[in-house]
Amino acid sequence: MSDQRDRKFLIDAMLGNIVSWLRILGYDSEYWVGDDDELIEKARRENRIIITKDKDLYVYATRCSIETILIDEDDTEHILGTLNRLHKISLEFDPELTRCPICNHLLQRDGHNVREWLCNNCGKRYWMGRHWKNITKILEEAKAIGRRS
Ligand SMILES: [Zn+2]
């Protein structure tokens, strides 16, 4: 299951690490701490889908006609599995679409080394090292959970 990563997300503070995951997967994703009304206003203005663990916020945002995804799961693999199964969020890593997990900017391939990426915005470099195996492992587990449930 693959898509063009054209959906954008706004993720509430309780799901902090999911922001980084969605960025790695190529989705324009922002993290939100603060007032619910401002969150809804930002989602509307920027055409973002809200992802939250807060049931009251889910009900309120849905009532305000903002597309909102309510998460029940706690661990990363299960959350990603559910996003994949119910909301068609791709768990396939695409090196051309991946974004900086820290600042959400699209990453550039390093010209000399296909295993390395550079963020032109915050200057951070990423490479397919040991950390990479961990990312792949979690995505594989999330895919298995998505298929199973
Ligand atoms: Zn960056």
Image: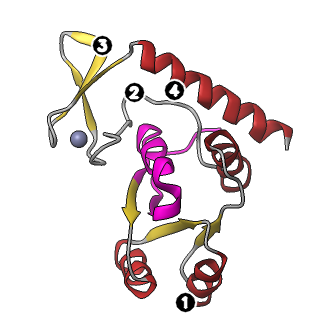
Q: Which residue is label 1 attached to?
A: 64
Which residue appears farthest toward the top when viewing the image?
112
Q: In terms of depth relative to the viewer, which is nearer, 83 or 38?
A: 38
Looking at the rendered image, the disc whose residue lies closer to the viewer, 1 or 2, is 1
Q: Which mark is residue 114?
A: 3
Mark-to-mark CA distance, 2 and 4? 13 Å
Amino acid type shown at disc 1: Cys
For label 2, the SS is loop
For label 3, the SS is strand
Whole-percent x, y for residue 44 in the image: 41, 80
27 in magenta: yes
What residue span does the magenta drawing correspond to?
1-28
Mark-to-mark CA distance, 1 and 3? 44 Å
Mark-to-mark CA distance, 1 and 2? 36 Å
Residue drawn at the location 51% of the way across and 67% of the way down: 49
Q: Earlier in the sequence, mark 1 or mark 3?
A: 1
| 67 relative to 98 in the view: left or right | right
Looking at the rendered image, the disc whose residue lies closer to the viewer, 2 or 4, is 4
